[in-house]
Amino acid sequence: VQLVESGGGLVQPGGSLRLSCAASGFTFSSYAMNWYRQTAGKERELVATITSAGGSRNYADSVKGRFTISRDNAKNTVYLQMNSLKPEDTAVYYCKVKNWGRDYWGQGTQVTVSS
């Protein structure tokens, strides 16, 4: 299993970014996918989840209405569209899949929201 995140960067408050997570090594279309984030000294926080076919999505209260999780099963990729970004969204963002009872994580991508 391999997960590779991309799309992070520096953005001003109110701006947007789209994160991507390219997956390989498992049947992507059969698994729910998750985005987490982590800041220094804090535990990883679940940001968003999408079911295997994309029919159901859930979000942390802190990002509802601003972030959208989506997936393209033909491309084995899950996305996180982040709009109206705030300084408190600054974190390393990770995608995760639970496969055969084990959690697999990508290497993370840094998102910094600052003027």
Image: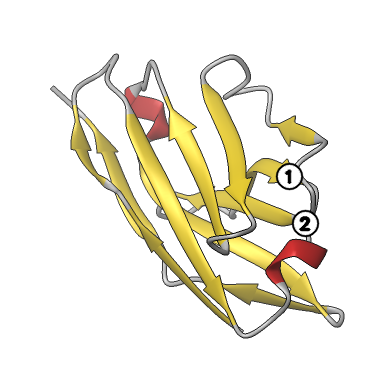
28 versus 24 height, above or below: above
Kind of residue sitting beneath label 2: Ala
Which residue appears farthest toward the right when viewing the image? 101
Q: How is the image coloured?
A: secondary structure
Residue identifier under label 2: 32
Q: Quadrant of residue 64?
A: top right
Residue in view at x 57 percent, y 24 percent = 63
The N terminus sits in image quarter: bottom right
The C terminus sits in image quarter: top left
20 versus 68 height, above or below: below
Choose between 25 and 43: the one closer to the eye: 25
Real-space Cα separation, disc 1 to disc 2, in angstroms: 6 Å
Kind of residue sitting beneath label 1: Ile
The crowd level at tag 1 (other Cα within 10 Å; few <14, some 14-19, many 20+) is many
Choose between 76 and 43: the one closer to the eye: 76
Residue identifier under label 1: 50
Choose between 64 and 53: the one closer to the eye: 53
Tell me, yes or no, whether the two marked residues, 1 and 2, touch with CB atoms within 8 Å: yes
- Where does the image place residue 82, in percent across and percent down from the top left? 43, 29
Residue in view at x 57 percent, y 64 percent = 76
Residue in view at x 36 percent, y 22 percent = 85
Left/right of residue 41 with respect to residue 76 in the rendered view: left
Q: Quadrant of residue 5?
A: bottom left
62 versus 26 height, above or below: above
- Where does the image place residue 18, in percent across and percent down from the top left? 38, 38
Left/right of residue 21 with respect to residue 33 in the rendered view: left
The crowd level at tag 2 (other Cα within 10 Å; few <14, some 14-19, many 20+) is many
Which residue appears farthest toward the front when viewing the image? 74
Choose between 74 and 4: the one closer to the eye: 74
Circle 2: element type = loop
Mark on residue 77? none
Looking at the image, is mark 1 or mark 2 earlier in the sequence? 2
